[in-house]
Image (spheres, helix red, strand yellow):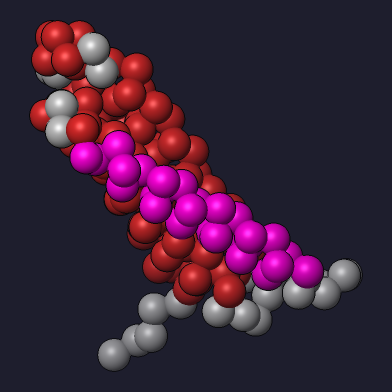
Amino acid sequence: MKKVSTMQQLIVLAAIFGALGVGLGAFGAHGLSAILEANGRAETFRTGTHYHLIHAVVLLAAAWLSTQVDSNLVLYAGYAFVAGILLFSGSLYILAIFNIGIMGAVAPLGGTAFIIGWVLLGVAAFQITPGS
């Protein structure tokens, strides 16, 4: 069986989370708008989709970086971004739709995962060999 490269893993994750982000954004704007407005949480849902989509695109940047460095840091950064999407955006989606206040306490864990991902990506960038 062929081994899947870091680049392939990250592109697949970007595609999955990009598609989910667009779908959830559209569903929030159209199918869920009455519920979100009734809960006073439309902006919360939009914040979730905003960070979700940004980090789906960042997974593509990580995929490119994985071709420039020989390090697992990029893959770990990608996994941190995925955790961030699930924890940060996911908790905001649940909070907005179901008005479950405790989910607001989960969001900082996702935010921390995003920060860890960015730090790992930055550290990995220092491993790029100039002129390669």
Picture residue at 70% right of the left edge, 67% below the top: 123
Residue 110: x %, y % from top left: 40, 50
The quarter in which the N terminus is drawn is bottom left
Picture layout, residue 26 above or below residue 56: above
33 with respect to 51 (left or right): left
Q: Nearer the viewer, residue 95 or 93?
A: 95
Residue 117: x %, y % from top left: 54, 59
Q: Nearer the viewer, residue 11 or 119?
A: 119
Which residue extends farthest bottom? 1
Picture residue at 30% right of the left edge, 37% below the top: 104
19 with respect to 130 (left or right): left
Looking at the rendering, the stretch of residues picked out in magenta corresponds to 102-126
- In this rendering, does residue 85 appear at all? no
Picture layout, residue 106 above or below residue 63: above
- In this rendering, does residue 116 appear at all? yes
Picture layout, residue 7 above or below residue 54: below
Tell me, yes or no, whether the highlighted magenta stretch contains residue 21: no
Picture layout, residue 91 above or below residue 28: below
Residue 16: x %, y % from top left: 30, 50
- Location of residue 12 (image quadrant): bottom left
Picture residue at 65% right of the left edge, 81% below the top: 70
Residue 4: x %, y % from top left: 39, 78
